[in-house]
Every structure is written in structure tokens, then in C-alpha cells.
Amino acid sequence: MRPERADGEVARLARGTLLPSFTGAAPPRWLLDELERGLAGVTLFALNGNVPSTEGLAALTAGLRKVAAPLVAIDEEGGDVTRLGGHLTGSPYPGNAALGAVDDPALTRRVYRSLGAELSEVGVNLNFAPSVDVNTEADNPIIGTRSFGADADLVARHAAAAVTGTQEAGVAACAKHFPGHGATVEDSHLGVPVVAAGLDLLERRELPPFRAAIEAGSQVVMTGHLDLPEITGGVPATLSHAAITGLLRERLGYEGVIVTDALDMDGASGAIGIPEAGVRALIAGADLLCLGPREHEASTRAIVAAVEEAVRAGRLPLERLQDAAERTGRLKDWLSGRTPGVVDRASGLEAARRAVRISGALPEWVPGPHGRDPGAAPLVVQLEATGNIAVGPTPWGLGPWVPDLVRAEGSAAEAAPVLERADGRGLVVVLRDAHRHAGQRALATALLAARPDAVLVEMGLPVWRPEGAVHLATYGAARANAQAAAERLGLA
């Protein structure tokens, strides 16, 4: 093979590992040109304006397919992490924590099949879901309600159900974040979380859900930017041969496509830059590189150049790129033979309703089957709680069903005006991960001291439960969760 021909082949193989992002509701010219040159596909982000509407997204993906047959990936977990219409209104599907609370794998399969069908309808063929992390740390800042729960066996059975349901709808599932992001109290967007677990503990806690997802046929597995000192020796798993090739390929026997979590995250590239992180991930055994929401044309070209240089220098064997291309090719072949599923949004509301858990007896002001005098509507106070980086600015809460809602920052000093406004009627206090927000706890405690008949609605993980309080847990803040809570309180 002549050198110039070899270089051209390396560039094409390098492009075949990339899933960059772009801005806007239409594919830019540079992206179409790169697809023609062998780009593997794209990652869509609502915050980039890629999802103006379902019709707009369908038109966008159709434009991509005019020039190639790309992978079109998105982060659509349902629940709190939603990128379709839910990023504007809240998802009609509850997230994994609610599904785990119900613990009906058949229902989980049904929900994910419907999610997959919605993605297929708009031309998305790779979903970066489900999260199969076992959330053993209540203070985990990035997983939380994205996990099915804290028990490895429970997470494993729902991981298999979610993978199966997604792929029955003709969309490739992606089990994440290998080898497991649930035992951390750090966010890999901002640094490199440490998982202090040896192989024995991993086998009992983190790995069972990944084994289950693999056995269910998950077409893709995503790596997490996690340091497991006993396994990776201080290197993030995304860049670790021991984690990707040794643990995932050899120990778990996984033969499908491995994709990185977004390389713009500090946990992967903060110390070395995105092009070098991409090269190291490929050397470690990854097949596809997700670049992140801000990484467009310049990053794409920089990584291609870095990969070409790594091959010339002998750091990255050409065979490793060819292996990645073969796996990605098999994934695209699998997708080409899929039949789209049927949307079943009723599954989402059913799951959200079944997930609601109430501790204590609802007070008398909550109506029975005959309804309430409209003049006696309760005051709802919703405490400030921004979503984490993965969740983004998705709306949440009981607002759509509440005629009188007060938003509070979260401090005991806010109690007096709230109590005055709630005089003579019911009081609902809406929280989100109160165990992680001292201000939420302070205000809720002050309100309960004066109004023990108030109802606390927790829309995150129900870790903090004041003794004696009436507590309603939804296990998530999706629109479906909010409607289920509103129904139980007679607001909807």
C-alpha cells in the first residue's frame, strides 16, 4: 500500500470512530462532508438546538441519511435525563429509580420499548441508555434517580429488561457507565471519581448489571471516566486497557461496540486534552468516541490528525482501528435489519403511578373520591433544586397541576410568609433530593413544626424522611412522576 493511500485509509478509519456534535436544527455543511468521508455518526444534544420538535428532529436525521448511513445517538434515559420533547416539558416516562421501585421487569421492558419506538420514529438509532450503575452512594451527585437502585440483583434484572425493550423497538441500547458510577460522590464531568473496589467487590456489586445487559444482547456498552486504583492504577477506565480490554472484553466476554462517555468531560480529558484522550481510548480498546456537546468541526479534525500521528508513531496499531471499524460495521448491519416498535406512552404513566410510595396517613384536606371544593385548593411550595449536569435545565415539579404555587430558595427564614399564605388550607412541600440540600431540609422542618398536616413530596431519592411526617415519594421528577403525585393529592 502506497504511503499516501495508507494515510488516506487511516484518516477514514479515524473518522469511523467519531460521534461529534453540532449546533442547530439542520446538519451543517462540514458535518455532511465528514459523513461522506467516513464519519461514524453524530451525537445529538437538546442544548445544541438539535431537538426543536419531533418533526424538526425527524427532518434533521433525514438530512443526515441523504449522504450516509450514520449512527445517530442521543441520551434519552426517560425520567430526569430526557432529550426529546421532554427537555421542554418533562418526560412522559419515569426514570430508572421509579422503575426499580415498582420492580416489574416486564413493565420496564415495556417502557423502554416505547422510548425506543419514539426514538426510531425520529430517526435516532442509538440510545445512550440504560444507566445500569448500582447507586450505593446516596450522595452520588450524578447518578441518583438515573439508577434502578442500590441492589445489584435488582439493577441487573432491570438492565436486561431495558436493553431488551429498547432493541425490540429497533434501536441499539447502550449499557453505561462501565464499570459502574454508582459508588462515587464525585461527578466525572468535573474530575475523576475514585471507585475504591477490587475485583471481588466489583464482581458482587458493579458488574452483575453489565453481565445481564451483555447477556440480553446490548449492542453497545459505554465506559465511565472512573479511576479504580486496584484495576486501572490511577487511569480513568475510558483510557485504561485493563478496564476496557482486560475487564470488559476478556473477563466479561463482551464482543459488541464500546463507546466512551463524552470526552470533553474533565474526567477523561481535563489533564491531557480531547485529541490525546481519544487516542488513548482507542489504544485501550474503545471503538467509538463520543466527543460532547461543545465539540464540533475543530475537535473532529483535531482527533483525526491525532489518530493519524499515533498510527505513524506506532502508538496505535492500524489493526486496532480496523477492529473498531469491523465492530461498528456489524452494529450498522444489525440496525439495518430492525423493525420499528410501537409507541406506548400509557406505560410511562402506569409506571409512575405504581412507583408512588406514601408514608403516613394523608391528612383530611386531601380529597377522597368525591373531590374538593375548588376554593380550598392547597398551597404548594416547591423548593429550589437544580438538576445535575446530565439532567440539565429540564422543567420539573407540580406546577402544571397547581393553581397556587410558591417557589422557595430553601431556608428557615422563608417559613413565616409561606405559613401565612397557607392559613386555612392544605400545604404541600415539594422537595428534590432533600438529603443533598440543607436548605430544603431547613425550610421543610420549619414548616412541619407549624403544620404537621403538611405533605412532603420528594421527587428525588427518598433518603431524608422526617419522623412523623406524611411523605410521598415519586422516585423521579419527570412529568409522569409529577402527574402521578398530583393525582394522589387530588390536584389532577
Image (spheres, rainbow, N blue to C red):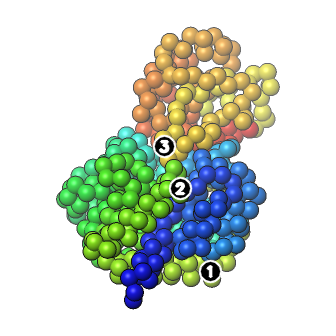
Disc 2: CA contacts within 10 A as few (<14), some (14-19) or many (>=20): some
Q: Give the SS element for disc 2.
A: loop
Instruction: Identify the residue at image location x=34%, y=48%.
Output: 270
Kindly report which numbered mark, 2 or 3, lies closer to the viewer in this rendering: 2
Kindly report which numbered mark, 2 or 1, lies closer to the viewer in this rendering: 2
Residue 170 vertical position relative to residue 337 in the rendered view, above or below: above
Q: Quadrant of residue 28?
A: bottom right
Instruction: Identify the residue at image location x=46%, y=78%.
Output: 8
Res. 373 visible in picture: yes
Rendered-image quadrant of the N terminus: bottom left
Q: Give the SS element for disc 1.
A: helix
Residue placed under numbered mark 3 in the picture: 389
Instruction: Identify the residue at image location x=55%, y=27%.
Output: 383
Residue 460 vertical position relative to residue 403 in the rendered view, above or below: below
Which is nearer the N-term, disc 1 or disc 3? 1
Q: Report, in whole angstroms, how far the alpha carbon at label 2 lies from the one at label 1.
A: 27 Å
Residue 296, numbered circle: 2
Which is nearer the N-term, disc 2 or disc 1? 2
Q: Give the SS element for disc 3.
A: loop
Residue 336, numbered circle: 1
Q: Residue 46: x, y in percent?
A: 61, 50
Disc 3: CA contacts within 10 A as few (<14), some (14-19) or many (>=20): few
Q: Residue 101: x, y in percent?
A: 51, 52
Q: In the displayed structure, does residue 161 sit left or right of residue 435? A: right
Which is nearer the N-term, disc 2 or disc 3? 2
